[in-house]
Amino acid sequence: MHPYVIEMENFFGPHADPIKAVPMKAYMRNQFEFLGISSGGIGELRREFLAAHGLPALSELEPVLRELWGLPQREYQYTAIGILANCARQLPADFSETLEYLLVNKSWWDTVDTLAGGTVGIHFKRFPEVREKTLAAWRRSNNIWLRRTCILFQLSYKKETDFDLLKEIIHENLGSKEFFINKAIGWALRTYSRVDAQAVRAFVAATPLHPLSAREALKWLDRQDEKNALP
């Protein structure tokens, strides 16, 4: 095991709370083990650990991430994502292969969404040629988490969102019965509605979206309408 990962296990282990771990595991449908450390607690521990040990060298980042991903307790995956976020603007172009590994292993919304809206979005903005090549593969994938990432990677782009690309990807996923796909479509549209409400309204009206997607897409706009209607 990598020395950095051993140090982390030794640092986090004494803070484990088996009692708190039980409901945390249940919330994630018993798919993952937990140390029993809250999200705020794990963030604080990560900051303390990084203050003492620093970030892994960029050349060592991939093996460290993969080993953290291989540990059974979910908090180590959350910590891996936090470390990765600190390095997001220094990653080499070919790091997209490692990002894909993290997305398709131990996949669930908690890790996929943070990666998609964070490091993946940053990486694709830094390397447009990587984005084009990677999206071409991920959009055709049978893996719902890669397709969800294609829908969500622009969440933080705001006015820089390529809405035509988003619409193309949404059209490719119309008719899906996957909750996580339909929810992502609504989330992406709702986020963009804060940038261009008219464009989102028009798209929703003209597109046979799943009811969940349409409802989620218009949620923020409907709330604004309600506020504006108040005397």
Image (cartoon, rainbow, N blue to C red):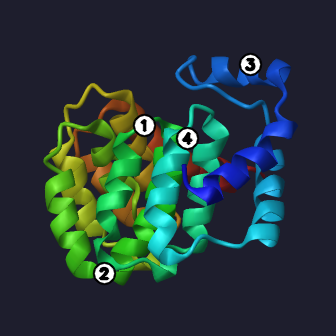
Would you call the spot at circle 1 few (<14 residues within 10 Å), some (14-19), or many (20 or more)?
some
Residue behind mark 2: 127
- Image coordinates of residue 225 in percent, x first then y, are 60, 52
Residue at image coords 22%, 38%: 208
Q: Nearer the viewer, mark 1 or mark 4?
A: 1
Find residue 110 and name its label.
4
Q: Secondary structure at mark 4?
A: helix
- Pointer 4: residues within 10 angstroms few (<14), some, or many (20+)? few
- Label pair 1/4, CB-CB below 8 angstroms: no
Image marks 4 and 2: residues in contact by CB distance under 8 Å: no
Q: Between residues 7 and 110, which one lies in front from this camera angle?
A: 7
Residue 142 location (% of width, % of height)? 18, 37
* Image vertical order of residue 62 relative to residue 91, above or below: above
Residue 209 position in % (x across, y down): 28, 38
Q: Would residue 227 be visible to someone looking at this image?
A: yes
Mark 4 vs mark 3, CA separation in Å? 16 Å
Q: Amino acid at mark 4?
A: Asp
Dot 3, how many residues are within 10 Å of its Cα: few (below 14), some (14-19), or many (20+)? some
Q: Residue at x 78, y 61 (%)?
A: 49
On the image, numbered disc 1 is attached to which residue?
107
Give the mark nearest the N terminus, 3 or 1: 3
Label 3 sits on residue: 23
